[in-house]
């Protein structure tokens, strides 16, 4: 198994996803500075449990969600996103990710010290004129390797208050992410 399960079908899906993200980025660019900024700790998140019991995560109820393979959700107002990929069997997930983004005119820049390993990673993601600060965290669940990716738009910049809020939202998503056996309900 390779990254995105059978790269040709997976790359097509990722290409469609990235085109949608680019269109979202263009819409966000128009309204980012006019957004109403929530205050306080992110609350009222909705939960999603993977049907295979591999992971559970929570995200804001106003975010758009699509699919389970891979799971992805994003803020229609700011472009912040969360994505969970199964990278089981991939020998070079960062290289494959770079190729997928290049296929749609985007690019991901991974810190050089992170290229040779599947560990916590940070970098930037560019799709057209929109740049995201991106981080990825690997998890082991039921013998499978999962990759939790989070990102927030950094260019064009959001207002300082909205940027701080989105940072807290992404931290909450990462903190509350659960992988493996702890996601299964009792009796399941």
Image (spheres, rainbow, N blue to C red):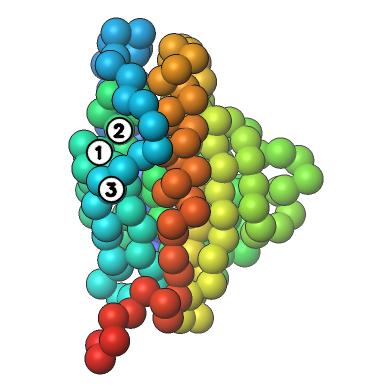
The alpha-carbon separation of the residues under discs 3 and 2 comes to 13 Å
Residue at image mark 2: 75
The image position of residue 24, as x and y in percent, is 29, 24
Name of the residue lying farthest toward the bottom: 187
Q: Residue at x 27, y 60 (%)?
A: 48
Quarter of the image for the C terminus: give it. bottom left
Name of the residue lying farthest toward the front: 40
The alpha-carbon separation of the residues under discs 2 and 1 comes to 5 Å
**Taking 48 as reference, is 137 left or right?**
right
Q: Earlier in the sequence, mark 3 or mark 2?
A: 3
Q: Earlier in the sequence, mark 2 or mark 1?
A: 1
Identify the element where label 1 is drawn.
Answer: loop
The image position of residue 113, as x and y in percent, is 78, 45
Q: Which mark is residue 63?
A: 1
The alpha-carbon separation of the residues under discs 3 and 1 comes to 10 Å
Q: Which mark is residue 45?
A: 3
Q: Would residue 181 be visible to someone looking at this image?
A: yes
Identify the element where label 2 is drawn.
Answer: loop
Q: How many neighbours does mark 1 have within 10 angstroms: few (below 14), some (14-19), or many (20 or more)?
A: many
Locate residue 68: give its quadrant: bottom left
Q: Residue at x 36, y 58 (%)?
A: 57
Identify the element where label 3 is drawn.
Answer: loop
**Which residue is at the front of the view, 45 or 25?**
45
């Amino acid at each position: 198994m390779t990254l995105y399960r059978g790269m040709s079908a997976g790359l097509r899906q990722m290409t469609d996803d990235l085109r949608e993200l680019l269109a979202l980025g263009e819409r966000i660019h128009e309204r980012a500075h006019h957004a109403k900024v929530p205050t306080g700790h992110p609350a009222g998140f909705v939960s999603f449990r993977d049907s295979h019991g591999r992971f559970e995560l929570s995200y804001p109820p106003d975010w758009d969600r699509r699919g389970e393979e891979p799971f992805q959700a994003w803020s229609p107002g700011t472009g912040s996103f969360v994505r969970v990929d199964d990278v089981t069997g991939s020998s070079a997930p960062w290289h494959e990710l770079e190729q997928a983004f290049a296929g749609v005119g985007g690019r991901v820049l991974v810190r050089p010290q992170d290229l040779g390993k599947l560990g916590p990673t940070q970098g930037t993601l560019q799709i057209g004129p929109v740049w995201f600060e991106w981080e990825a965290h690997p998890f082991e669940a039921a013998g499978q390797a999962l990759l939790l990716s989070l990102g927030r738009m950094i260019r064009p910049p959001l207002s300082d208050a909205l940027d701080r809020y989105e940072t807290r939202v992404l931290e909450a998503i990462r903190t509350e992410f659960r992988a493996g056996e702890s996601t299964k309900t009792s009796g399941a």
